[in-house]
Image (spheres, rainbow, N blue to C red):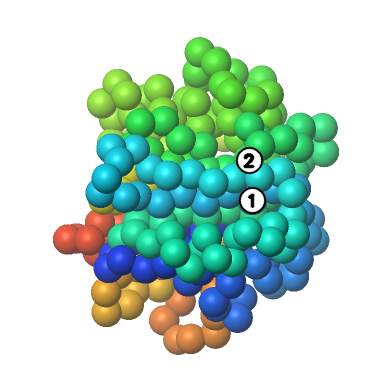
Amino acid sequence: MCRHAAWLGASRALTTLIQEPEHGLLRQSYAPRRQRHGTVNADGFGMGWYDAARPEPVRYRRSIPLWSDANLPALAQIARSGCLLAAVRCATVGMPVEESATAPFTDGPWLLSHNGRVARDAVRDLADGAESACDSAWLAAAAFQRLRAGLTLGDSLAEIVAHAGAKDPGARLNLLACDGAALAATVWGDTLFHRRTEDGVLVASEPLDDLPGWQAVPERSLLLATSSDGVRVQPL
């Protein structure tokens, strides 16, 4: 239902996730190669990055197609960080198309994106409230509530996915979250890939290019990545 991507490592510009790769998020917004549900991702886009001058990430998101934002190319060339997250959205039928329903969601130092769908009744008891009525916003609120309580990125996502997946067996719960120093992602119902480079790691719903090294993350897995420890994948 969406496509998302993240980078953790040496400082890079956002354009390395969006416009620069042949199959970056710009192309994935209108011609994804591995998307199982939906054909275009034109219901909004967003991105987040970290700057040493701010304690919280910077976020930019809109409820229009990514390709129609004339300001984005220049912004994506200038916005630079060692931790980046970006997403394009294909809204589930019945979900609102609005900025507050568009990833990445944020709270404190955290950014989160959701690729998939879940019955709202399966997630409403996980959080006290959300900024939008959409399912993704409720999943984000649930994650942030657990992170504020002290859970790690990985434990927070794993707990939410297990709970929501049990209540809605048909849910697709690919979550991607970061805090500036670490990434965590779940694979539950859709694709996810990672690729290690000399200076970091890329994580994306589908490969951003045709370079060697992309590895598919198995279904119902949790991916964890840090600059110091590299990438770990474990069953959910």
Q: Is residue 169 left or right of residue 232?
A: right
Dot 2: element: loop
* Quarter in which the C terminus is drawn: top left
Q: Quadrant of residue 22?
A: bottom right
Tell me the kind of residue under disc 2.
Thr
Q: Residue at x 63, y 32 (%)?
A: 100
Q: Quadrant of residue 102?
A: top right
Instruction: Indicate which disc residue 54 carries.
Output: none
Q: Residue at x 74, y 70 (%)?
A: 31
Q: Is residue 43 left or right of residue 15?
A: right
224 vs 57, nearest the viewer = 57
Residue 73 placement (x, y as % from top left) = 59, 66
- The tag earlier along the polypeptide, 2 or 1, is 1
Query: Does the rendering let one see residue 115?
Result: no
Tell me the kind of residue under disc 1.
Phe
Residue 10 placement (x, y as % from top left) = 27, 68
Residue 127 placement (x, y as % from top left) = 50, 18
Circles 2, 1 touching at the beta carbon (< 8 Å): yes
What residue did someone put label 2 on? 102
Q: Residue furthest left?
A: 228
Q: Residue at x 80, y 61 (%)?
A: 39
Dot 1: element: strand
Q: CA distance from mark 2 to mark 1?
A: 6 Å
What residue did someone put label 1 on? 45
Would you call the spot at circle 2 few (<14 residues within 10 Å), some (14-19), or many (20 or more)? many
